[in-house]
Image: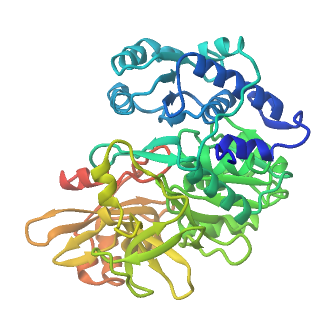
């Protein structure tokens, strides 16, 4: 039987000369592919000799470092399920994740050791290791004594490789179970679709506790044997310094906005780049156009989610259209109404998907898992989607974001797109709030740009009244300095709903 372990897939794509550089960066030493392989073997030996067995979970809440990447690879190699946790999570959140997942081993920042140890012990964990932002801590200290030989554990495609908890903006966070096949198939699809080669150099500035930075970016590079310039965080000055040495950059829309604010961000700086991709949040048409005008590059926007990795992508070769997420990748897709009936092209409905990239289910939530799948195996993404006449797909909002006002369906993205075109507007977000007559009222939060024009609530309402039906016109508009976002740049509409309901 061929070993389906994702680590074996990576290892098979490493260069013949293992002394070639795998990771380098302004704040780190250089790591060869041999360093990565040896480090993963040592940590895998440490974890297994600590008592972790295939199928056990390893929960990790640490700052970004190459050693944290090596830990991820070690978990795969040892047949353990990797469970990354956002570094912003607080004690109560961490307690929930550890209690729910019952990891055999937890790795945390040294400053959190006492608190995390108490939580882990209560949940029946075997050991807590530390790892700091410089790659030091008890994990690396103890791993050093172990052998750099480790026979990668055999895994089937259906075996668990990782658990990623969804953001939990409504209700309890759910642990999405991702298999070796889920991650491997999606990684190979993206590598081929985006034409990654061993000669590529990926400039990596994303967090590694999230699908985007951990799976999409790293997997494309590892499956190509490509070099990674590894930044501890997004720093515009460091990005500008390293772009001329890079060929690929992946970012969330906020990063592109910040780059466009840099006078030094020019076409010449991007002279060796072949690909910029965007995801994790919608990319404004204004940003897409400004970026193309400045650099000559059209950002490739794609769409994905924790439960399935990347689902659609604008073409690598061919027109990349602003406001769209392109075409389906290696998964079957359909757009349906609430009852699961396929709608006709051009109509808005819920995107449903099926394929090797679609997750196994939610950790210890069989009822929730069953509710999210159709009888024929399609996963209900909850994303309201429209397939245009041009064949390109457009994500118009989450089904939970749908506003029903006076019996009419209102899609926030449609209203936002018009508000964002209004002179003096930087960006907007539209939500619903309870209304005694209409059921829900449309409320808009608008961020002005830095032009001299002063925006008022009345200006926005009057503008939209000229563009859209009355039931879509906001009943109230808040002019705000910024929109609340999570670490990946997604607007936190649950917070805006709370503010709208409170009249703030």
Horizontal and vertical percent position of residue 382: 36, 64
Residue sitting at x 47%, y 41%: 163
Dividing the picture into quadrants, the one containing residue 287 is bottom right
Q: Tell me if residue 403 comes above or below residue 261 in the rendering.
A: below
Horizontal and vertical percent position of residue 427: 45, 62
Q: Tell me if residue 390 comes above or below residue 33 in the rendering.
A: below
Horizontal and vertical percent position of residue 373: 36, 62
Q: Tell me if residue 415 comes above or below residue 162 in the rendering.
A: below
Nearer-the-camera pick, 202 or 260 = 202
Q: How many marks?
A: 0
Nearer-the-camera pick, 174 or 284 = 174
Residue 361 visible from this viewpoint? yes
Q: Which residue is most to the right?
A: 17
Residue 32 visible from this viewpoint? no
Dividing the picture into quadrants, the one containing residue 446 is bottom left
Nearer-the-camera pick, 51 or 323 = 51
Q: Tell me if residue 248 comes above or below residue 22 in the rendering.
A: below
Residue sitting at x 44%, y 72%: 417
């Amino acid at each position: 039987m061929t070993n389906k372990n994702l680590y074996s897939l990576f290892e098979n794509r490493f260069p013949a000369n293992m002394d070639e550089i795998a990771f380098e960066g302004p704040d780190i030493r250089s790591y060869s592919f041999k360093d990565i392989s040896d480090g993963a073997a040592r940590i895998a030996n440490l974890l297994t000799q600590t008592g972790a067995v295939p199928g056990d979970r390893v929960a990790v809440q640490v700052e970004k470092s190459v050693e944290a990447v090596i830990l991820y690879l070690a978990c795969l190699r040892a047949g353990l399920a990797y469970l990354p946790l956002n570094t912003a999570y607080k004690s109560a959140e961490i307690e929930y994740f550890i209690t729910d997942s019952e990891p055999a081993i937890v790795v945390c920042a040294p400053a959190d050791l006492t608190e995390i140890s108490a939580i882990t012990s209560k949940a029946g964990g075997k050991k807590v290791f530390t790892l700091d932002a410089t790659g030091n801590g008890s994990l690396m200290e103890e791993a050093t004594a172990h052998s750099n030989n480790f026979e990668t554990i055999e895994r089937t495609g259906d075996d668990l490789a990782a658990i990623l908890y969804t953001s939990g903006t409504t209700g309890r966070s759910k642990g999405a179970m991702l298999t070796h096949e889920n991650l491997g198939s999606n990684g190979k699809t993206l590598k081929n679709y985006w034409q990654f080669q061993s000669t590529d150099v990926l400039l990596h500035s994303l967090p590694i506790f999230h699908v985007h930075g951990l799976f999409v970016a790293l997997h494309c590079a590892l499956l190509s044997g490509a070099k990674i310039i590894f930044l501890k965080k997004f720093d515009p000055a460091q990005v500008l310094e390293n772009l001329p040495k890079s060929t690929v950059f992946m970012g969330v829309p906020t990063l592109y906005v910040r780059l466009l604010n840099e006078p030094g961000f020019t076409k010449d700086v991007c002279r060796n780049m072949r690909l910029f991709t965007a995801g994790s949040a919608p990319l404004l048409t204004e940003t897409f156009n400004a970026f193309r005008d400045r650099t000559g590059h059209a950002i490739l926007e794609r769409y994905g989610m924790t439960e399935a990795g990347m689902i659609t992508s604008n073409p690598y070769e061919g027109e990349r259209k602003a406001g769209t997420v392109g075409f389906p990748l290696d998964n079957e897709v359909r757009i349906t109404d609430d009852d699961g009936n396929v709608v006709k092209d051009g109509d808005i409905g819920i995107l449903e998907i099926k394929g090797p990239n679609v997750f196994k289910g939610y950790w210890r939530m069989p009822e929730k898992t069953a509710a999210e799948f159709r009888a024929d195996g399609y996963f209900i993404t909850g994303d309201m989607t429209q397939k245009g006449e041009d064949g390109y797909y457009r994500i118009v909002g989450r089904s939970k974001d749908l506003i029903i006002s006076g019996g009419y369906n209102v899609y926030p993205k449609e209203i936002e797109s018009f508000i964002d075109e209004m002179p003096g507007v930087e960006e907007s977000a539209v939500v619903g709030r309870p209304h005694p007559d209409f059921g829900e009222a449309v409320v808009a939060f608008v961020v002005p740009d830095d032009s001299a024009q002063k925006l008022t609530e009345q200006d926005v309402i009057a503008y939209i009244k000229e563009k859209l039906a009355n039931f879509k016109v906001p009943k109230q508009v808040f002019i705000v300095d910024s929109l609340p976002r999570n670490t990946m740049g997604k607007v936190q509409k649950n917070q805006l709903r709370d503010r709208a309901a409170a009249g703030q």
